[in-house]
Amino acid sequence: MTVGSSLLNPIYLFKGDAPLAEFAATQPAVIKMGMKVIGPKMFKEYPYTDAYMFDDARQIREAIDLPMMLLGGIVDRPSMDKATGAGFDFVAMGRGLLREPDLPLKLQEDERRRSLCVHCNRCMATIYSGSRCVLREYVRPIPARSSAS
C-alpha cells in the first residue's frame, strides 16, 4: 500500500522534513523563485513515525485476500514484525536503503538495530542527479568488472 503524492502535498507520502532549499537548488531560476513564494504552502511537513502507513494499509489488508506489501517508515525489525504479524506478505524499504544499502543484512545480524535514516527527505532533491542519501559519508564504489575470461 502507498498513498501516492500530489502537487498539493508532495511530502505526505514521505513524512518528515520538507527540505525546500534543497528542492529549489535543483530547479531552474524561475521555478526556484516560485518555490520561495509558494513552496512553504505546497511542501508541508508531516510528522514522521515508524510504520506510518500501517494503520491505513491494515484496513485494506483486512478487506482483501491478495498478497500485500507495506511501505512507509519500515526502519527496524519491530516494524517488519508488526507488518508480517498483521498479514502483510512483504515490507518495502526506501530511504533507509539509500542511507545504508546493506541495512537488511545489518537487521538480520542485530534485531535491535534500526536504520540510520533521519527522515530529512534531502534525498528527494537528488532524484534528477542520481537518487542518494546526502548524509552518507562514504559511498562504496562499484568494482570494475574484469575483462579476463
Image (spheres, helix red, strand yellow):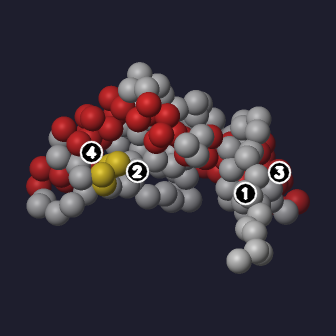
**Horizontal side of residue 25 vs 123, given as left or right:** right
Asked whether the beta carbons under mark 4 and mark 1 sit within 8 Å of each other, the answer is no
- Nearer the observer: mark 3 or 1; the answer is 1
Q: Amino acid at mark 1?
A: Ile
Question: Which quarter of the figure is the N terminus placed in?
Answer: bottom left
**Horizontal side of residue 92 vs 56, given as left or right:** right
How far apart are the alpha carbons under marks 4 and 2?
A: 16 Å
Q: Earlier in the sequence, mark 3 or mark 1?
A: 3
User: Element at badge 1?
Assistant: loop
User: Element at badge 3?
Assistant: helix
Asked whether the beta carbons under mark 3 and mark 1 sit within 8 Å of each other, the answer is no
Q: Nearer the viewer, residue 20 or 126?
A: 126
Task: Report if residue 43 is visible in the image.
Answer: no
Label 3 crowd (10 A; few <14 / some 14-19 / many >=20): few
Q: Earlier in the sequence, mark 1 or mark 2?
A: 2
**Which residue in the protein does label 2 denote?**
92
How far apart are the alpha carbons under marks 1 and 2?
A: 24 Å
User: Element at badge 2?
Assistant: loop
How far apart are the alpha carbons under marks 4 and 1?
A: 39 Å
**Horizontal side of residue 27 vs 4, given as left or right:** right
- x and y percentages locating residue 73 in the rendered image: 43, 39
| Residue 67 falls in image quadrant | bottom left
Q: Earlier in the sequence, mark 4 or mark 1?
A: 4
- x and y percentages locating residue 102 in the rendered image: 55, 43
What numbered label is drawn on residue 25?
Answer: 3
- Nearer the observer: mark 1 or 2; the answer is 1
How far apart are the alpha carbons under marks 4 and 3?
A: 34 Å
Q: Determine whether 130 is above or below 119 in the image.
A: below
Q: Amino acid at mark 4?
A: Asp
- Nearer the observer: mark 4 or 1; the answer is 1
Label 4 crowd (10 A; few <14 / some 14-19 / many >=20): few
